[in-house]
Image (cartoon, helix red, strand yellow):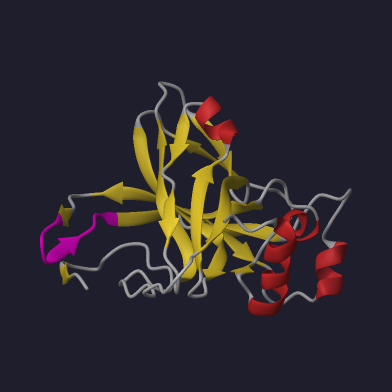
Amino acid sequence: MILGVNQLLKLVKEKKLVENLSERELKNPEGAGFDIRIGELYEVEGKGFLGVEERETPKIKLIAKVDELRSSSPTERAKASEGGKENEVFFDFADARVVNKKKTKKVWLEPKTYYMMKTIEKLNLPENLLAFFTPRSTLFRSGVYIFGGQTAPGYKGGLTTGIYNFRDEKFGLEMGSRVMHIMFFEVKGKSNLYRGQWQGGRVTTKKKEKQV
C-alpha cells in the first residue's frame, strides 16, 4: 500500500520521516509523495570495482552544493521568501568558494556525461516503510535521467544517485530544484533493517572495502 500525503505529513511531523522538506511539500504536496531537491552535484572520476566480497566506487569531485540557512529562525526564513517563492537556500560552489544568498545558481550538465547527486532532504525510515524514488518527468522529457531506486527500512540519511544527460546538448539545472518524487510503501510482515555502509548518506568509498 502506498501512503497518502495526509499520513506522510503526520509522520514528518511526529517521526521526522523526511527532514528538510521544502515549504511547498509541507503545505501542498502533489500526488502520493513528496518532490525532493538536488543539494549536491559531483563529477565522477576514475575506475570502480564490484566483487563478491569487496568493492570500490569511483572518486568524486564536488561541483556545486546547496547550503541551508542553518542559523536562521523561522521568522528570518519567512522574511527571505518573496512572492510566495522560496529563498531558503544559498549556494556554495566548491571551486569559487562564493556564497550568494540572493540569486539561485545554475549548473550545466555536459552532453553524454554521468554525475552523482545527493538530495537536500534526509530520510528516517522506520521498519515498516520502504521508499521508492523516480525522476520528475521534466527531466526525461529533456533527455536527462536520474537513476531511481528503493531505499530499505531503517535507512537514515540523504539520497545519493546518478544523473545522466543523454543528449548532445548541455542541460541547465538549478541547484535546489525539485528533481525527484519519492513515495512510501508499507511493508507487511517482518523486515530486516538496512545495515549497509551507505547509512548516513555517504556518497562514495574512500578505498576498497569489504561489503557487509
In x, y percent, where is residue 102? Answer: 74, 53
Residue at 89% across, 48% down: 83
Q: Which residue is outermost to the front? A: 189
Asked whether residue 76 is in view, the answer is yes
In x, y percent, where is residue 2? Answer: 59, 55
Which of the pair 127/156 is nearer the observer?
127
Within the magenta stretch, is there residue 54? yes
Q: Is residue 136 left or right of residue 160?
A: right
In the rendered view of the protein, which quadrant contains the C terminus? bottom left
Q: Is residue 19 left or right of residue 196?
A: right
Within the magenta stretch, is there residue 6? no
In the rendered view of the protein, which quadrant contains the N terminus? bottom right
Q: Which residue is outermost to the top? A: 168
Q: Is residue 74 left or right of residue 99?
A: right
In x, y percent, where is residue 175? Answer: 59, 48
Residue at 79% across, 76% down: 73
Query: Which range is magenta?
Result: 50-59
